Image: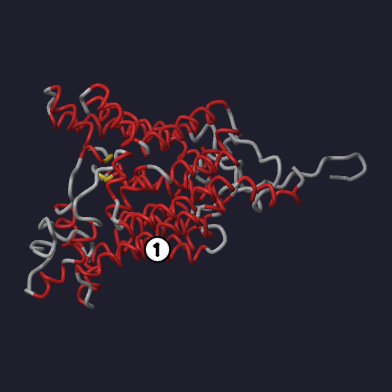
Amino acid sequence: MDPAAAPAAIRRARLPYTAALCVFTALAVGLMASGAWSLLTWLGVPVLEVPWADLRPLTGANVAIERGLDPMFDNPGDPWGRPFNYPRVWLVLPRLGLTAADTPWLAAVMLLALSCGLWALRPLVTSRRAAWLLAAGALAPTTWLGVERANTALLMFALVAGAAALATTRRATASIALGVAAVLKLYPIVAAAALLDEHRRTTLRVALPLGLAFIAYTFWIRNDLGPIRAGATHAPWLAYGLELLPTLLSKNTGLNAPSAFAAAGAALLATACVALLARRRGRLGAAGTASSLAGFRAGAAVYLGTFLLGHNFDYRLLMLLPTLPQLATWTMQGSGASRRLATASVTAVLALQWGMSWRAGLTAAIGDATAGVLLDELLSWGLWAGMAWLFAATLPDWLLPRRWRDAPLLDSEPSAPLEGPSPASARPSRPRRTVGSGA
């Protein structure tokens, strides 16, 4: 491809994703305005009687505050009596006058944030395949679940997606965005993997202050960590994470629960070790762009990290969207093993994001939800293994022991430059020895 024609070609390649964003925006605004949330049941999305349910513990917290109660333990303003389980920084809003009457406005803010995050991923798209994959992910039931519940995961996604898009050009701004997300919900701190660079100093200049600030913040709110975790709602049929498969097996097979959890933890540890050992024999990072690689690292790190938390509602699968542009590139460029693994990972990402739809169809066909839940769990575990291997393969050399460095690249250079230099730093070649040069 002629480099001069690359921008026009990329704009054409992005058209499916651009069209999907326009469709999504129109549908989301229409649902917000009309309240016809029951239409989402056609996608298998469970709809609650009270819209924007996940904002209610926050917008109703003013009732507890006015009565001198701690909403983390007693939150009568929530329609279901659920405790407030976010970091207390959110309580600034009800203290400033936020009430249940403001829920629609706050839900609109969350939707706006989601839309901004989806548009922030558009520059990461450099191929028609990536555009179609992102379009399929953006319109998936997991996205609509987050919209219907107005969960704060929409805002976290926007901050992480924006940070991924800026990680290679505005590193300080990206670090601030990740810091804000971590203050609000803690878990987005692992998306700081987007700040990784081939040079140690470049990485540490922004990542080290962010990490130290997060440690200090976590220590400051340490007494709230227990109530935050205890107040989390559990719905295994709408979630992914470490605890779900062992719980399912122990309930249906008679397997001892502690043994099941121990085996699950050992399996993940072994998988991570194998992935790191495989990094000695090959690495990834030449194909694609620096921005798409940053997006992959951010999204993969969030999925790998939140899986270890044990239980996460499926709207957090939104965080996998930034991985798709880089995964799409790896399905086309690279060694046979890396292409196959990238293809399997893409398949698992979309299958999980559309899981509510196909599981509803499977349940209707066989009259039992167990098979769908089990298959969904197997997909989530398989994706964890694939993401662990691919993420480890992108680790820069300076993070590894010296004897593991300089592994061969498993993905080839792109045929034409699409966005600046390749993520993997090119090593200067030595001049050839010639008879007359004296070299």
Could you tell whether 162 is left or right of 156 in the image?
Answer: right
Residue 176 position, x and y percent, is 43, 66
Q: Secondary structure at mark 1?
A: helix
Reply above or below: 51 against 77. above
Q: Answer with the quarter of the image where residue 368 lies.
A: top left
Q: Residue at x 51, y 50 (%)?
A: 294
Kind of residue sitting beneath label 1: Leu
Q: Quadrant of the N terminus?
A: top right
Residue 46 position, x and y percent, is 24, 43
Q: Residue at x 14, y 57 (%)?
A: 227
Q: How is the image coloured?
A: secondary structure
Could you tell whether 6 is left or right of 191 in the image?
Answer: right
Among all residues in the image, which is located at the extreme bottom?
A: 96
Reply above or below: 343 against 327. above
Q: Quadrant of the C terminus?
A: top right
Q: Which residue occupies the foreground of this view, 118 or 280? A: 118
Report the residue marked by disc 1.
210
**Residues packed near mark 1 inside 10 Å, few (<14), some (14 to 19) or many (20 plus):** some
Residue 159 position, x and y percent, is 41, 60
Q: Residue at x 89, y 45 (%)?
A: 437
Residue 414 position, x and y percent, is 66, 41
Q: Which residue occupies the foreground of this view, 105 or 373? A: 105
Among all residues in the image, which is located at the extreme right?
A: 436
Q: Which residue occupies the foreground of this view, 328 or 284? A: 328
Number of marks drawn: 1
Q: Residue at x 15, y 56 (%)?
A: 226
Reply above or below: 191 against 347. below
Reply above or below: 12 against 344. below
